[in-house]
Amino acid sequence: MTDQTHTLTQSTDIPTTVIDAEDRLKPLDAPALWAYRELFGFLVWREITVRYKQAALGIAWMLLQPLAAIAIYTLVFSVILEVPSGDAPYVLFVFSGLLPWRYFVSSVGRGAGSLVNNAALVSKVYFPRLIIPVSSVIAPLVDFLISFSLLFPIMLIYDYSPLQPRFLLLPVFLFLTVMTGLSLTLWLSALNVRYRDVGPATSFLLQLWFYITPVVYPTFEVPENLQRIFAINPMVGVIEGFRWAILDTESPDFIAMGISVGVVGVLLVSGLVFFSYMERSFGDVI
Amino acid sequence: MVDTAIKVENLAKRYRINTLRNQDTLASQIKTLLTPWSNSADENSDQDYVWALNDLNFTVNRGEVVAIIGKNGSGKSTLLKLISRIIRPTRGRIELHGRVASLLEVGTGFHPELSGRENVFMNGAILGMSREEIRKKFDEIVDFAEVGRFIDTPIKRYSSGMHTRLAFAVAAHLEPDILLIDEVLAVGDTNFQQKSLGKMNEVAGQGRTVLFVSHNMTAVGALCPRAILLSKGNQLMDAETPLVIKEYLKVNAAANGEARWDDLNSAPGSDKLKLRAVRLINGGEVTSDVDISKDLIIEIEFENFDEGAEILSAILLTDRVGADVLASANMHSATMQDDPWFGRPHPVGRFRTRCVIPADTLNDDTYNLNVFLQTKINHIEAEVNGALTFAVHDTSEIRSEWTGKWRGVVRPKLAWNTEFLSETALS
């Protein structure tokens, strides 16, 4: 509980902690977070280890899933429905959208329930609660990197080269994806502590979200006058960025991109404030 | 040089009764918002709050080992949770000088899929040890836990004994300035408990400050020179342990052979199941003075609100220092003949369970009755520790032959038979 606790260091090296009932909102208590960096590392490590220990096929499974998704989406949307994908081959087009989208779904899906799933920890030990949702957003990056490794062979098959400066901007867009997932996770995980129906609501929300995100269809198919409203969905900016960096499509609409980034910023800051507000009662209600 | 380790001033914690009920869903919240005529104005009235702790004041010096004792619901655990920063106070202030580690439960964060080794590191980190510290103490921890070559096996394959030993071993090797302990000694078999007690003694002897919450008065007496007694959130006494234990037993002794909860809101239990009354019947009378030569009937009345629940009743008798004497439950394997309601879905309504402790079972002494209602094995729905206290009096003819105090916890009449085997020649 970062808000009611402040650590003063006295002249001796014995740390003094004062706990009182004062209301202090500290959305980002950097020293406290730094002090618990090892626990954070262990939480991320536990998420990853447990995930891969349970999966019998291990990494093979992580490769199979995106490949199956690519195959199905290509069959349904390109072959049957003939959705256009610009100059790019549909396989590569849909994969460049699926990469960030799949990460987003698994980070928010796991992150939303993260505090409740760790109720035993939250009700028994003190640490900055923020490290729980953050670690569950970081852990799926491993899945992301494994499916990302598929990108190179697929690019080579379609004669696309990853050796271009734009490709180096991918980490920037990945960062934007992580921040999008994190901002939503902060809101949902904190709400979930108090309202247990947030869990099922989240998977429903993510299902609907898929349809307003240009994963299987291109943004240019969206009517001109709706484009800006469309960009309020931060995943639009993210996927536009990924496609631009991978497929060398025409440069993304920077205003739309700006809107997406702005929305993420607002969600993230408000999420941090909301989280630290809710955090004070986690121990009481979880 | 400050010699104070913990300073608690006017500490109070208030809970809203609403938050204790488990009906908070977003849907119900929205419904309340959309129903303007719902009587939300009442929500802030005083009756909706309970004070779990009220105006606590005490100071613990560095190196002191202090016990916090009190009945269930007296606020002991709330106090530890406040000091360990898991919940925040409503009023007042706590000052802590030094690194704090809290052991509110052993094995927090243990994951069944991870190996013993991995769990030691994980659990250590959760309890506030650095990776370096754990690495240094790793061999010692494994040694103490007696899990040896199983250290790289996933702990889902561990026996429950190994599991608790490993969990306790990590906890026992913490080296904070201030250690908060809640009931962790109640793990493992007697041997391991003995070893754990020794380890706690060692920790206490190293000049660490320890706050120790326990029902086990033997452990409290052995470990802590000073004790603080809490009752209903108030600080009743802060003195030398023997004096406090005496007071605790006095406060705890129920005056009669019946405990009733007529008000459903304060009755122990959950939304699904509430305990309504516990009674001791001996010789046809409700009493807390039990004649050893007559059957003792323990009567438990409860109310079920969950249509179709399978309910298990259980009792645990403890002696005056908190050591277990006898446990029983109305399950198939533990009864002389099947309880007609055991294993059957209970309709909504009120039930009475009776357990008969035959005459000449318990020796004359004072016992505490703890009552549990469970819906599954290991899932306690309602629990009252120290629901009643009763004294067994040896009034039978046994005393005309032997006038001293009969030794032992139980005093059954057993079959004895001596035979004459052969003559022995006297030289």
Image (cartoon, coloured by chain):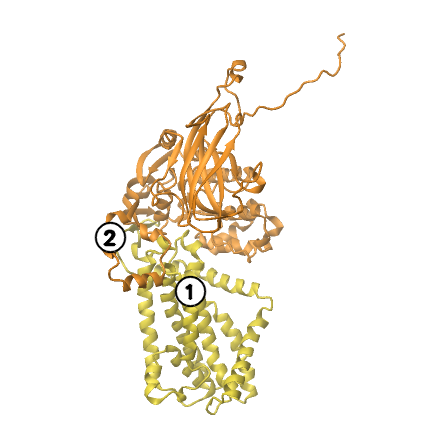
Chain colours: A yellow, B orange
Q: Mark 2 points at which residue?
A: B44
Left or right placement of residue B363 versus residue B251 in this view:
right
Camera-nearest residue between B282 and A201: B282
Could you tell me if the residues under marks 2 and 1 are in contact, i.e. CB atoms within 8 Å?
A: no
Asked which secondary structure carries label 2, the reply is: helix
> How far from the left and from the top, in percent, is residue B241?
38, 32
Q: Where's the N terminus of chain A, which quadrant?
A: bottom left
Q: Are marks 2 and 1 on the same chain?
A: no
Q: How crowded is mark 2: few (under 14 residues within 10 Å), some or many (20 or more)?
A: few
Determine whether B170 is above or below A223 in the image. above
Camera-nearest residue between B418 and A193: B418
Q: Mark 1 points at which residue?
A: A199
User: Alpha-carbon distance for marks 2 and 1?
Assistant: 29 Å
Left or right placement of residue B194 versus residue A221 in this view:
right
Q: Where's the C terminus of chain A, which quadrant?
A: bottom left
Residue farthest bottom in this picture: A87
Host chain of mark 1? A
- Decide if residue A241 is in sight here: yes
Residue in the image at 77% along x and 10% along y: B425
> How far from the left and from the top, in percent, is residue B366?
44, 27
Determine whether B67 is above or below A82 in the image. above
- Decide if residue B173 is in sight here: no
Looking at the rendered structure, the kind of residue marked 2 is Asn
> How far from the left and from the top, in percent, is residue A116?
42, 59
Asked which secondary structure carries label 1, the reply is: helix
Residue in the image at 46% along x and 73% along y: A103
Q: Residues within 10 Å of mark 1 (few under 14, many from 20)?
A: many
Looking at the rendered structure, the kind of residue marked 1 is Gly
Host chain of mark 2? B
